[in-house]
Amino acid sequence: MRVVVRFTTTVALLGGAFLAVAAVWVSTCGGSVADALACGVPQRTVLALGAPIILLAGAVRAFVRAFGSRRRTDTWWAWQGSAWLLIALMVLVAVAGAPPLAAP
């Protein structure tokens, strides 16, 4: 069970750290000092989609662990709960965090 909690916490922190770095990066894209190469539409799109992709990858990994461990151990329900939590966080980050990051 500790492995599941550690995995979920690590993935959530990685997604949150990416979101924080993206927010700081985008905050420097205003005014006359904005670099067109660092603040263009493709870069902002990657920054907006990075955290949800990290969380989705963690959820997929947790689902794989849940269905893989279903035959071997009794912790499959913890992995499945972890996957659903990460999907919920992904949706929250995608809905609340991505539009401000991707908007010009």
Image (tube, rainbow, N blue to C red):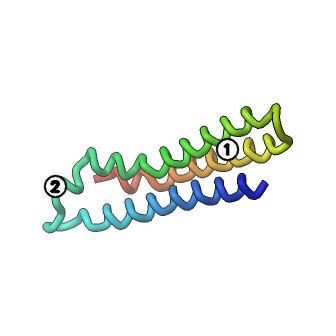
In the picture, measured across the screen, residue 77 lies left or right of residue 48, that is: right
What residue is pinned by disc 2?
36
Determine the residue positioned at 60% across, 51% down. Answer: 89
Label 1 amino acid? Answer: Ala
As drawn, is 60 to the left or to the right of 22?
right
Please tell me which residue is depicted at 34% across the width and 46% down the height of the picture. 45
Crowd rating for badge 2 (residues with CA inside 10 Å; few <14, some 14–19, many 20+)? few
| Residue 30: quarter of image | bottom left
Q: Quadrant of the N terminus?
A: bottom right
Task: Tell me the residue at 65%/54% (across/down).
Answer: 8
Q: Which residue is mark 1?
A: 83
Q: Nearer the viewer, residue 52 or 68?
A: 68
Q: Amino acid at mark 2?
A: Ala
Up-down relation of residue 31 to residue 7 (above or below): below
In the image, residue 69 above or below residue 49? above
Q: Secondary structure at mark 2?
A: loop
Describe the element under mark 1 as helix, strand or loop: helix
Task: Residue lying at the far front in this picture: please name it.
Answer: 72
Which circle's residue, 2 or 1, is located before the other in the chain?
Answer: 2
Which image quadrant is residue 35 in? bottom left
> Separation of disc 2 and disc 1 at Cα?
37 Å
Q: Residue at x 16, y 55 (%)?
A: 36
Task: Residue 104: give x, y in percent of width and height.
Answer: 27, 53
Query: Is 27 left or right of 89, judged from the image as shown?
Result: left
